[in-house]
Image (cartoon, rainbow, N blue to C red):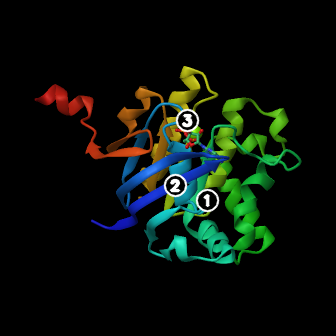
Amino acid sequence: MEIVADLRNVRKIYKMGDERIMALDDVNLTFEKGKIYCLLGTSGSGKSTLLNVMAGLEHPTSGSIRFKAGNIEKMSEKQLALFRQKYIGFVFQQYNLLPTLTALENVMLPLIFRKFGRAARRKKALEMLRSVGLNNRSRHKPSQLSGGQQQRVSIARAFVNSPEIVFCDEPTGNLDTKTTTEMMDLITGMARKFNQTLIIVTHNNELISYADKLIRIRDGKIDEAVDVVKEQELFLK
Ligand code: ADP
Ligand code: MG
């Protein structure tokens, strides 16, 4: 078992005037290489805060968050930026594509920071667009694409750099049922193929079946990860 991320006693307190909001309350979690995690909780339970803190987008109030690259709570902003470029991919509910760039340019973006030349970046991004079934939309801007197509572009962008961990924050929140199934098959298929760790944040119970481990979060508190029993296994019992 190879551990890719380890969280110990992580707290995140937001101060709003006199009020203190405990968004993460003594979180202890271990994430293994190649496993798919579903982080399930109602709105306001602290899911996005957990992802943002793990991605170094927000500082924890206390506690430690260790990746292979080191403890991110000790990193400078510059080190954090490098850490994110190298280790982390993100898929958001709102897709977060740059509107003035084409689909291809959006997917090429994470490769700018690597040592690839422009031709190599283009080639890699085109391969990625092909693998999400969008090679015939490479010159389209996000506004010229459907929601499902935009999410495909953002999946290609998240995986193009072969990150060790991919975070998905409500990746299917804006999509219909059929597209949700397509996107989940795509995301989990890629993660399985390249043995990447996937953390899918959702309030949708139906996404649990895609995961190996289920983590429930409530009021910033975590229930330790439990194995997801697949339907076939239940059937065999
Ligand atoms: P979820 O993603 O599960 O819906 P969040 O992680 O966004 O929940 O929020 C957890 C709690 O922290 C909520 O009570 C929310 O109102 C609060 N919160 C989140 N971000 C901030 C912020 N920047 N400032 C103050 N409170 C926040
Ligand atoms: Mg959220």
- The amino acid pointed to by label 3 is Met
Q: Is the Cβ of the residue at disc 3 closer than 8 Å to that at disc 1?
A: no
- The amino acid pointed to by label 2 is Lys
Q: Give the mark nearest the N terminus, 2 or 3.
A: 2
Instruction: Name the side, left or right, on which 217 lies relative to 166.
Output: left
Q: Give neighbour class at mark 3: few <14, some 14-19, many 20+ (Cα, 10 Å).
A: many
* Circle 3: element type: helix
- The amino acid pointed to by label 1 is Glu
Q: CA distance from mark 3 to mark 1?
A: 27 Å
Residue 186, placed above or below residue 178? below
Viewer-nearest of labels 1 and 2? 2
Q: Is the Cβ of the residue at disc 2 closer than 8 Å to that at disc 3?
A: no
Q: Nearer the viewer, residue 109 or 125?
A: 109
Q: Quadrant of residue 74?
A: bottom right
Residue 15, placed above or below residue 57? above
Viewer-nearest of labels 3 and 1? 1
Residue 124 in picture, x, y percent from top left: 67, 62
Instruction: Name the side, left or right, on which 176 lies relative to 98.
Output: left
Q: Which residue is mark 3?
A: 183
Residue at 76% from the left image edge and 46% from the top image edge: 97
Q: Which mark is residue 12?
A: 2
Q: CA distance from mark 2 to mark 3?
A: 31 Å
Residue 123 in picture, x, y percent from top left: 72, 62
Q: Is the Cβ of the residue at disc 1 closer than 8 Å to that at disc 2?
A: yes
Q: Give the mark nearest the N terminus, 3 or 1.
A: 1
Q: Which mark is residue 58?
A: 1
* Circle 1: element type: loop
Residue 127 in picture, x, y percent from top left: 65, 55
The answer to whether mark 2 is within 8 Å of ligand 1 is yes
Q: Nearer the viewer, residue 23 or 119?
A: 23
The answer to whether mark 1 is within 8 Å of ligand 1 is yes
Going by the picture, which residue comes out furthest to the top?
A: 177
